[in-house]
Image (cartoon, helix red, strand yellow):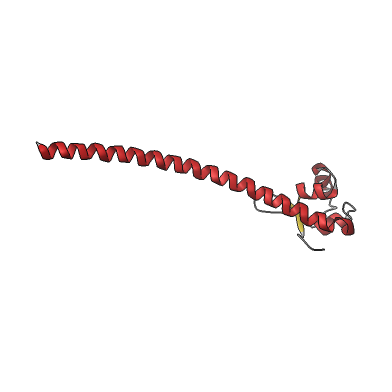
Amino acid sequence: MQGPTYLNQDEAAVVCGKSKDTIRRYRRGGRLANSRQRLDGTVEIAVSDLVAAGLLDPLAAAGDVAEVATRSRVERDLVTSRQELEVMRTQNQGLQERFEHAKAEIEFLRSLLRQTAVA
């Protein structure tokens, strides 16, 4: 089977046509023995476990697995990118405000220097 070896619980539920709770119950019941948990807490399910548990037909779903996983990961990456962009916009706005404040302060100090130089 081509495509990803592991799917997260949401992806597994979509590919199998089951609810996320069903996937979770199979996992907790030990029927998805090769599942693993990433450092970020995301649970990944082996596609082979889904087939072995009878949740996934390996011949009919081979293309679906790759398509769903790719689409899901692209959507997650898009959400992450949007969040990062919003953080950068906020940081940029803060820097812009500091720049404007510094610019006004420099102009004020220059005006004081001009007054001192004239006097």
Q: At 36% from the left edge and 42% from the top edge, which residue is drawn?
A: 99
Which quadrant holds the C terminus?
A: top left
Q: Tell whether 85 sits left or right of 71.
A: left
Q: Tell whether 50 sits left or right of 107.
A: right
Q: Is residue 23 visible?
A: yes
User: In x, y percent, where is residue 19?
Assistant: 82, 42
- What residue occupies the far left of the structure in this picture? 119
- What residue occupies the far bottom of the structure in this picture? 1
Total numbered circles: 0
Q: At 64% from the left edge and 50% from the top edge, which residue is drawn?
A: 77
User: In x, y percent, where is residue 52?
Assistant: 88, 57
Q: At 43% from the left edge and 40% from the top edge, which residue is drawn?
A: 94
Q: Where 6 falls versus 114 (above or below)?
A: below
Q: Where 118 falls versus 9 (above or below)?
A: above
User: In x, y percent, where is residue 54?
Assistant: 90, 53
Which quadrant holds the N terminus?
A: bottom right
Quadrant in the rendering for residue 102: top left
Q: Where 119 falls versus 7 (above or below)?
A: above
Q: Is residue 35 visible?
A: no
Q: Toward the viewer: 61 or 35?
A: 61
User: In x, y percent, where is residue 56?
Assistant: 87, 53
